[in-house]
Amino acid sequence: MIIAVGAFALVLLLVAVLIVVIYNGLVRKRNAVENAWAQVDVQLKRRHDLVPNLVEVVRGYAGHERQTLTAVTAARAQALGAHGLAEQASAENALTGALKTLFAVTESYPDLKASQNFAELQEELATTENRIAYSRQYYNDAVLTYSNAIQTVPANIVAGMGGFTAREYFQAPGEERGPVQVRF
Amino acid sequence: MTVWFAAAAVATALWALLLLVLAIATRTPDITPGPPGAQPADESPAVVDLITGGWRLCDEAASATLLDLAARGAVQIEEVGPELSLVRLRQAEGLNPYEQLVYEHVRSLARDGVVATGALAEGSRNLGRWWKSFRKKVIADARRRGLSRARWSRAHATLLFAAALVPAALVAVAVTVADTSADSDRDGGIGAGVLAYAALVYLAGRLNGERGTDLGVQAAGHWLAVRESLSNSRFADKPAASVTIWGRPLAYAAALGLAPRAVRSLPVSVPADDRRAWSDYGGMWHAVDVRYPSRLIWGRPPLHAIGRGLAAGFFAGFWTWIVLIVLSAFELWPRALAQPGGFAVGLAIAAVPAGRALLDLTGQTQIEGQIVRLRRRRSGGNENRPKYVHWCAVDEGRGRELKAYGMAEEQWSRLSEGDVVRARAGRRVGWIGEIEVLRNTAHRGHYADTQDHLIDAPRNLGEVRPGWGEPDGGMRS
């Protein structure tokens, strides 16, 4: 009888240890996702902050490209007001498209291209785009690792009990999850 | 005869004594740390690493050089996440040769001007040659600054090499006199003398190295004082990206062994990890985990896998049959089922590899991607005819975990890490049948070799890790 109780207690202890280990692992992975998202968010905010300066500089040299400038401003506003990762990814993609159009338009303005202020902003935006691409890849990798963890046996049981819910990838609907390269 | 051998032994001992005396006379004097509060001088971190490390260059020198380039704006190090930082190329002007070497390595890996820090160990450069070139360039700079010099001067070397002729000649005479066989043409003595001379010259060469000049000792003392000052700044936990804040002091801290975290995150001069690879397939650097599965079934040609499966099935079935016969003797198993039982077990054991191999033989799939790891490991044979298994891991851009495939040596030897390839492979037994290179690697890392610094800097000077670039280290570069 004592042996049976002891064995039962040992099994219970092992199960408890296993649950703790799995739970802590899931917490670490969830934190990694949140940390990765914070990195994406920092870069997106940086881009949002750069856009008004860019628009102002371009307006000074190419004021009659109103349609293009309005499109950029509207895309930025849409990105700022987006809710949910899918919507935000779509809005950010739209902003990237609008910026590409803007940079294409600036090719026709030699004075603008010669402006040091513009060149610095363009360089800064290109760098930020690159950082966004990397941080986005990093975030999606973290989500993949987390998703695999919460969906596989036996961690899925602990995930269900601990309220570990699935996280969204940072991608627009219908978009392939993979590297997104943008060159201005 | 004995007299000649005794004379040779005495001459060798005297020559060794001369070597010892010269070695003691040419030791670098003891270094006394300078007064506290010293500020960094204008030596580069790599030179600082050399003179504060007993005139031996350490692994940290290359990482410290990259940090210095970041501090001076030639590159930028940015942190994207806890495990991901980027090195971004900037304008580089006025770099000295070893800084240029590091910069060129980064540039050879950069995609759109960016490389992940973890990927700095990648590329198809020959790491041993790269390190040798780096080391010689650093030494050249140290000598130009009057901080370092070769241990043996020309006079020392001439004296040692000339003196070595005496014991070598006595060995030659002793062996010649001792060679009394009738059919001998008595040229064994000359061979022994040449061998003895070569051995003594080699020994003198092994003891050669770099030593500090008076100015170098003074500078080393100054830098030890700087080290003391920097040790209060807690650089140990600072990431490489913090060079943006700390600037050159972080680079010097790395060279002085005070910033291990930053050094570890910039693996410029260390071999790439077998199981953790960095790939830029798809345009952006990302890490992939590479597995080399057990070769019970995986990584063998399909016909070999079938053969092994049948052999395993035969042995398993035979021993099961024996066991069942024994069990039936104790009436624990029906005698009539002993043979069918053994047959069933053998069939089950053989069916798995044979079935998988047959499926691969009939339907290989096409894989396309970038080679991220090429490794070979010894799998048997003897010293004269070793056998190797050749592994090739291809990043297809579909996931972050890869299984390496086995392949034939003649195909493997034509490939380089970084090549974009198309292959026909069996995904069930992991064997690449055909492979073609679509695009050669862009990471060849062209660099100025040692030609611009043909200095007398013996190989034993730096702490080159044994096995770099060697198959036993599993590395092809």
Image (cartoon, coloured by chain):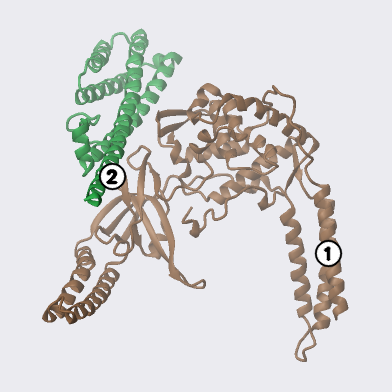
Chain colours: A green, B brown
Whether labels 1 and 2 belong to a single chain: the reply is no
Q: Is residue A179 visible?
A: no
x and y, in percent, of residue B309 in the image: 25, 71
Q: Residues within 10 Å of mark 2 (few under 14, many from 20)?
A: few
- Dot 1 lies on which element? helix
* Residue A141 horizontal side relative to residue B447, left or right: left
Residue A91 visible (yes or no): yes
Viewer-side residue, B294 vs A97: B294
Chain letter for the residue marked with disc 2 in the picture: A
**Residue underneath mark 1:** B13
In the depicted structure, whether residue A163 falls above or below residue B358? above
Q: Is residue A27 left or right of residue B390?
A: left
- Residue B391 image offset from top left, x and y in percent: 38, 58
Quarter of the image where one finds residue B252: top right
Q: Neighbour class for label 1 at 10 Å: few (<14), some, many (≥20)?
A: few
Type of the residue with mark 1: Ala
Q: Residue at x 84, y 77 (%)?
A: B173
**Residue A82 located left or right of residue B47:** left
Q: What chain does mark 1 sit on? A: B
Q: Quadrant of residue B304?
A: bottom left
Amino acid at pointer 2: Leu
Q: CA distance from mark 1 to mark 2?
A: 68 Å
Q: Nearer the viewer, residue B289 or B70?
A: B289
Choose between B264 and A151: the one closer to the eye: A151
Q: Is residue A114 above or below residue A168?
A: above
Which residue position holds label 2? A14
The local secondary structure at tag 2 comes to helix
Looking at this view, is B365 or B225 the one in front? B225
Image depth: mark 1 or mark 2 in front = 2
